[in-house]
Amino acid sequence: MKKQNESFDKFALTKRSYFTIVGGIVLIIIGLLIMPGEASVDRSVFDKDMMFGSKLTLSVILIILGFIINLIAIFAQKKEI
């Protein structure tokens, strides 16, 4: 049993940190997918309804939150048992 713990201690991050990083990346991707507006039928005319503030605000908040979660997951210390 001790050999498994020794091999696991060689990793820089814990299993929980890797799952947290994946969650942060998912938040960033969701924010990037929300950000663009709907496609316009006529590209020569700009439609103001295409870009409304709450959609842009939510997407930026999700992206920043994803980066903060990733930083916390990377810099979190391993708990010593």
Image (cartoon, helix red, strand yellow):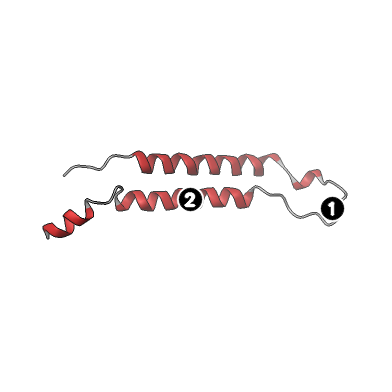
Type of residue at label 1? Answer: Arg
Locate residue 59: give its quadrant: top right
The disc label shown at residue 74, or none: none
Type of residue at label 2? Answer: Ile
**Where is residue 49 drawn, in percent x and y?**
78, 45
Is 68 rendered above or below residue 29? above
Query: Residue at point 73% right, 44% down?
Result: 51
Locate residue 72: give its quadrant: top left
Residue 7 horizontal side relative to residue 38, left or right:
left
Instruction: Name the quarter where the N terminus is drawn.
Output: bottom left
Query: Residue at point 46% right, 48% down?
Result: 24
Cα separation, mark 2 vs mark 1, equals 32 Å
Query: Residue at point 39% right, 49% down?
Result: 20
Locate residue 76: give its quadrant: top left
Residue 68 horizontal side relative to residue 47, left or right:
left
Q: Secondary structure at mark 2?
A: helix
Residue 45 horizontal side relative to residue 20, left or right:
right
Query: Residue at point 17% right, 54% down?
Result: 6
Instruction: Name the quarter where the C terminus is drawn.
Output: top left
Circle count: 2
Is 27 rendered above or below residue 64? below
The residue indicated by pointer 1 is 43
Query: Could you classify mark 1 by the number of other residues whose Cα lies within 10 Å: few (under 14), some (14-19), or many (20 or more)?
Result: few
Q: Secondary structure at mark 1?
A: loop
Of residues 57 and 16, the one nearer the viewer is 16
Q: Residue furthest left?
A: 2
Residue 65 horizontal side relative to residue 47, left or right:
left
**Where is residue 74 drawn, in percent x and y?**
37, 42
Query: Could you classify mark 2 by the number of other residues whose Cα lies within 10 Å: few (under 14), some (14-19), or many (20 or more)?
Result: some
Mark sitting earlier along the chain (2/1)? 2
The residue indicated by pointer 2 is 25
